[in-house]
Image (cartoon, coloured by chain):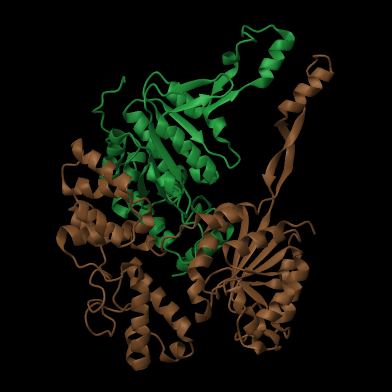
Chain colours: A brown, B green
């Protein structure tokens, strides 16, 4: 039963397993599911194991049981729309600016990347709240980017009470907020990173060492002698700096995201920063690189035992790396060229590596890769490269 | 099983149950699968287990997962030290040559050995590493584990109702997820929130509840807040407002925000909220 539903779920990219499908059959068999509403909640609890897929599930459910058309490529909805908006913008900046209710000048100053980011943000904004009419691109008709042309289900905004049919609930797509990332399961990266650990005894001596206690007790002719140890704790601090700007990194985003996800799960203390192409005066804590800058000079105050991992393709115009005013940001004009800053970071953190998603065989063709690999030990962002990088990071200085 | 198989969970005294969640809980109980709950802190993940235990009058056993925890600790503990002590002094009633006397059950062990069906809450599973999680699910799947020291197998007498909570943004491992049902508790909507407040404060003044709730949702909407206040904070806040004899409900409409510290626990958040409310007062 519901085989087609199951396979549609699989087709849109929700990781559903046959076992869970059998569990669902079991539930049906036992008569636990008596209505479509029951089926909606039940099938979701059994089949879908992450809130990231709740939205997709809603879409498939609405499609299967009510024939609401399924978006072509459900996962990339927002990106598609943002890109469509960019096209529209290129054709007719004025209309677009008016539709968005922003200054045309302001948009003009943005790079294509920034524009896309900005549009994406607006699209997401729209989805979360839909209060007034003034702020947003309407679905009505005046705007060049109305929803009906691209994604019929995309822009529906719910807001009614909870007691309604499952199809309606599904159509409402309450879980859209959570579906921003795609699936990331590359357990092997996790395996490689697991070795990045530094267990050290720390804290008060409050753990009893049974073996030692017995040995000491025997030495003491049976008079009990307790031996205490400090508990082992992972004391490793990691800073992960990721190049997330520019088209040049786009093909590698998937790998980098995986790495990032694992880093977060693996280390107690991992700080992630972002940069574009190379590092000048600041690293950013937010991925959009404008809210929370952090001056890299402040890093000198951090524990020098911190492991610094930089991820980037290290490919850029040579002047961006070498010139005093290489940064594209006007605020970053301390007069120190990027290459000096990189040297500074390498001096500060004795254990640092640069992971490059570009295949190692291609490195020789890019000047800046060669220059940076002279500063940081550079490894390819592959399993082998990662293993080597981890070994390097754990070396005794 | 002492519990009738048809026991249904329908919400408890202090817990307002979403009908959707209720059917998920009931299904998981019938299918005998653990239920994994995720959601913002303070949306009542832990409370759910308490509520289930209360309504179905089952004992509740809580395993608070810690990052350094090993699976064995959750199953049982072999108390070497007591045994050593007894062998030295020999003044206890325990039999030193019988290792069983020195095996203490951990939380999972207790749930397995309980005389009646119990609710086992495994709180904040994401704190432990993935090996722990996978191994634990094996145990919960088989409903049995071995005690190495005595070479005995402990099998669950009654399959406990298992609720697992996780705060993690990231997903747990695939084998883990494959073995449990999943639900994400979304943040309650104002309508739901009103019900929750009613349950917690049956005698609350209407205007106070309304004003507090609308002020609360406005506060949640302030941009750039790192840790948004959740249900727990709102309940504490209303409690604080109630306790203050000088406080009047209509002050909230005017923009006065007493006890902000109850809602915002991070100092940048607190400052931001304070600045905003301060400005509103000028009008």
Front-most of residues A390 and B52: A390
Residue A120 sits in quarter: bottom left
Q: Position of residue B114 (x, y in %)?
A: 42, 21
Q: Is residue A46 above or below residue B107?
A: below
In the rendered image, residue A191, in percent from the top left (x then y), is placed at 57, 53
Identify which residue, A291 or A120, lies in the foreground: A120
Residue found 24% across the figure and 39% down from its top: A27
Q: In front: A68, or A300?
A: A68
Q: Residue furthest right?
A: A220
Quadrant into which the C terminus of chain A falls? bottom right
- Residue B27 seen by the camera: yes
Residue A342 position, x and y percent, is 71, 75
- The residue depicted at 71 percent of the width and 15 percent of the height is B85
Q: Is residue A390 left or right of residue A144?
A: right
Q: Residue at x 44, y 35 (%)?
A: B121
Number of dots carrying numbers: 0
In the image: residue A220, left or right of residue A317: right
In this view, B225 is above or below A214: below
Q: Toward which corner of the image does residue B54 lie, by quadrant?
A: top left
> Residue A130's image quarter?
bottom left
Taking the image as shown, residue A345 lies to the left or right of residue A8, namely right
Q: Is residue A90 above or below residue B176?
A: below
């Amino acid at each position: 039963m519901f085989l087609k539903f199951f396979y549609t779920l699989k087709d849109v990219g929700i990781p559903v397993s046959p076992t869970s499908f059998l569990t669902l059959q079991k539930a049906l068999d036992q008569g636990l599911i008596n209505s479509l509403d029951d089926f909606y909640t039940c099938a979701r609890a059994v089949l879908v194991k992450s809130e990231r897929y709740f939205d997709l599930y809603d879409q498939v459910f609405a499609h299967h049981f009510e024939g609401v058309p399924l978006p072509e490529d459900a996962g990339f909805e927002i990106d598609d729309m943002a890109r469509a908006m960019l096209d529209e913008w290129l054709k007719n900046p004025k209309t677009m600016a008016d539709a968005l209710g922003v200054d045309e000048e302001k948009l003009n100053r943005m790079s294509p990347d920034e524009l896309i980011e900005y549009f994406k943000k607006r699209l997401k904004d729209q989805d979360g709240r839909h209060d007034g009419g003034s702020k947003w691109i309407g679905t009505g008709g005046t705007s060049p980017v109305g929803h009906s042309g691209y994604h019929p289900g995309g822009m529906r905004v719910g807001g009614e009470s909870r007691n309604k049919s499952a199809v309606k609930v599904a159509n409402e797509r309450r879980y859209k907020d959570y579906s921003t990332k795609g699936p990331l399961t590359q357990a092997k990266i996790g395996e490689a990173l697991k070795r990045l650990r530094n267990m050290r005894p720390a804290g008060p001596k409050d753990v009893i060492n049974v073996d030692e206690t017995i040995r000491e007790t025997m030495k003491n002719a049976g008079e009990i002698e307790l031996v205490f140890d400090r508990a082992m704790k992972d004391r490793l601090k990691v800073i992960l700096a990721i190049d997330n700007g520019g088209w040049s990194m786009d093909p590698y985003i998937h790998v980098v995201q995986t790495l990032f996800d694992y880093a977060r799960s693996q280390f107690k203390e991992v700080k992630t920063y972002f940069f574009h192409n190379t590092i000048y005066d600041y690293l950013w804590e937010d991925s959009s690189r404008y809210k929370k800058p952090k001056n890299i000079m402040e890093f000198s105050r951090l524990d020098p035992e911190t492991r610094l991992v930089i991820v980037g393709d290290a490919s850029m115009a040579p002047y961006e790396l070498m010139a005093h005013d290489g940064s594209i940001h006007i605020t970053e004009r301390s007069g120190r060229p990027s290459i000096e800053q990189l040297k500074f970071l390498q001096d500060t953190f004795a254990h640092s590596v640069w992971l490059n998603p570009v295949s190692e065989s291609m490195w020789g063709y890019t000047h800046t890769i060669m220059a940076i690999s002279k500063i940081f030990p550079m490894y390819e962002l592959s399993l082998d490269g990662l293993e080597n990088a981890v070994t390097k990071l754990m070396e005794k200085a | 099983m002492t519990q009738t198989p048809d026991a249904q969970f329908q919400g408890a005294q202090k817990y307002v149950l979403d009908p959707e969640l209720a059917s998920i809980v009931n299904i998981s109980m019938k299918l005998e699968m653990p239920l994994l709950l995720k959601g913002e802190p303070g949306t009542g993940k832990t409370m759910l287990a308490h509520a289930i235990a209360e309504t179905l009058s089952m004992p509740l056993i809580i395993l608070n997962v810690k990052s350094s925890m090993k699976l064995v600790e959750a199953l049982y503990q072999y108390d070497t030290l007591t045994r050593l002590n007894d062998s030295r002094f020999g003044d206890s009633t325990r039999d030193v040559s019988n290792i069983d006397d020195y095996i203490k059950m951990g939380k999972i062990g207790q749930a397995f050995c309980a005389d009646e069906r119990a609710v086992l809450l495994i709180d904040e599973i994401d704190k432990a590493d993935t090996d722990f999680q996978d191994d634990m699910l094996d145990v919960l799947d088989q409903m049995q584990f071995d005690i190495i020291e005595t070479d005995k197998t402990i099998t669950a007498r009654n399959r406990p109702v298992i609720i697992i909570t996780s705060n993690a943004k990231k997903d747990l491992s695939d084998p883990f997820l494959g073995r449990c049902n999943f639900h994400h508790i979304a943040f309650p909507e104002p309508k739901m929130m009103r019900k929750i407040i009613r349950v917690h404060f049956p005698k609350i003044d209407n205007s106070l509840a309304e004003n507090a709730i609308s002020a609360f949702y406005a506060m949640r909407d302030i941009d750039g807040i790192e840790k948004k206040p959740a249900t727990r904070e709102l309940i504490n806040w209303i409690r604080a407002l109630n306790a203050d004899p000088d406080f009047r409900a209509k002050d909230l409409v005017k923009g006065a925000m007493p006890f902000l510290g109850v809602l915002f626990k991070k100092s940048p958040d607190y400052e931001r909220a304070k600045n905003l409310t301060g400005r509103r007062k000028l009008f």
